[in-house]
């Protein structure tokens, strides 16, 4: 009587296609808010990497400047805060990867060991503390 013209049922129905698109849309909607957070993590990791590399450069620059000597630095525990271009010269800010990082230096002289205790803070362009380090340095130009 009625003979089937097509005996192949291997295709997808319209309902199956719509259901798969809806499920895919739900999965994308769940993961979409994660991408901005991943970008923020990437920026933070970049700032931390730059700051860790910048700490050595800042320490070297401080040693080279005629800024650290016993006549201008207080003895510990009174730390002298040094910020701004007037006291650190051009080394108060560093430009790396087209971003400007600001340096804040707290320093005092340890009388017993003839060294200077320094606290170096590095701030990102959006004024967030990226890195903080404590180190001892000798007199400038030694």
Image: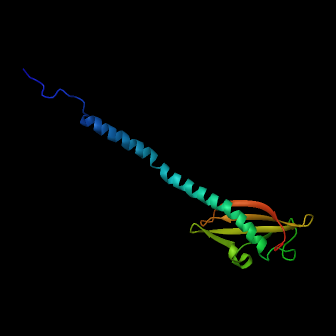
Residue at the front extreme of this rendering: 142
What x and y, as percent, mark residue 106?
77, 67
* Horizontal side, residue 9 vs residue 88: left or right: left
56 or 100: which is nearer to us?
56
Residue at the left extreme of this rendering: 1
What x and y, as percent, mark residue 73?
84, 73
98 to 31, vertically: above or below: below
The N terminus sits in image quarter:
top left
20 to 5, vertically: above or below: below
What x and y, as percent, mark residue 82?
75, 72
Q: Is residue 130 visible?
A: no
What x and y, as percent, mark residue 103?
69, 68
Q: How is the image coloured?
A: rainbow
19 to 36, vertically: above or below: above
Q: Is residue 59 visible?
A: yes
Q: Residue at x 77, y 64 (%)?
A: 119
Q: Residue at x 79, y 65 (%)?
A: 118
Residue at the bottom extreme of this rendering: 86
Q: Residue at x 59, y 65 (%)?
A: 126
27 or 141: which is nearer to us?
141
Residue 23 sits in quarter: top left
Residue 130 sits in quarter: bottom right
Q: Residue at x 33, y 38 (%)?
A: 20
């Amino acid at each position: 009587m009625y003979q089937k013209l097509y005996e192949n049922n291997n295709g997808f129905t319209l309902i199956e296609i719509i259901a798969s698109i809806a499920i895919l849309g739900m999965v994308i909607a769940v993961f979409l808010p994660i991408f901005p957070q991943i970008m923020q993590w990437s920026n933070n990791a970049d700032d931390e990497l730059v700051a860790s590399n910048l700490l050595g450069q800042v320490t070297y620059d401080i040693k080279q400047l005629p800024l650290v000597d016993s006549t201008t630095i207080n003895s510990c525990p009174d730390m002298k805060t040094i910020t701004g271009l007037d006291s650190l010269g051009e080394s108060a800010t560093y430009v790396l990867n087209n971003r400007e990082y600001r340096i804040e230096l707290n320093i005092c002289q340890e009388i017993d060991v003839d060294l200077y205790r320094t606290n170096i803070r590095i701030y990102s362009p959006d004024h967030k503390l990226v890195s903080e380090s404590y180190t001892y340095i000798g007199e400038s130009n030694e």
